[in-house]
Amino acid sequence: MGLILGILSLALLVFQLLLIARAVLDWSAVLAGPSTTGSVRARLTAAVWRVTEPVLAPVRRALPPVRLGGVSLDLAFIVVFVGILVIRAII
């Protein structure tokens, strides 16, 4: 049973790191501008989105982003990230 929980904890950690990578890549697009098609950053962004979006999309449908003036705060990202923290703490 310990091995299964260890593997689950590791998978959740990897997903957490992918969420952090997604946040960094999203902010790099905001600060540096959109990347050209086929660039390393564009391919990396697409790969991270393919992995994280299936988890974030259902949460985003239930909990849409909050508008704060000209900024939109993605609550789905925060909920999923904190949820993973809680699950890993329980494991």
Image: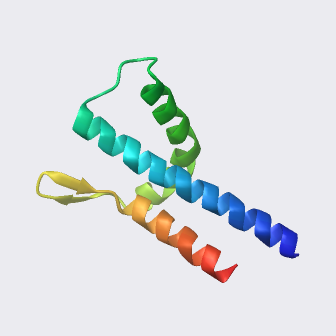
At horizontal 47% and vertical 59% (from top left) the residue drawn is: 59
Name the spot of residue 54 as percent of width and height, x first: 56, 47
In the shown orientation, is residue 58 left or right of residue 88?
left
At horizontal 54% and vertical 50% (from top left) the residue drawn is: 18
Name the spot of residue 79 as percent of width and height, x first: 44, 67
Name the spot of residue 46 as percent of width and height, x first: 49, 32
Quadrant occupied by the N terminus: bottom right
Give above or below for 54 relative to 88.
above
At horizontal 34% and vertical 25% (from top left) the residue drawn is: 35
Q: Name the outermost residue toward the left.
A: 69
Which quadrant holds residue 91? Answer: bottom right
Q: Name the outermost residue toward the bottom.
A: 90
The image's colouring method is rainbow
Q: Nearer the viewer, residue 39 or 79?
A: 39
Which quadrant holds residue 64? Answer: bottom left
Give above or below for 25 relative to 79.
above
Name the spot of residue 14 as percent of width and height, x first: 62, 55
At horizontal 70% and vertical 67% (from top left) the residue drawn is: 9
In the shown orientation, is residue 13 left or right of residue 39?
right
Q: Nearer the viewer, residue 16 or 60?
A: 16
The number of callouts visible is 0
In the shown orientation, is residue 48 left or right of residue 62?
right
Q: Nearer the viewer, residue 5 or 56?
A: 5
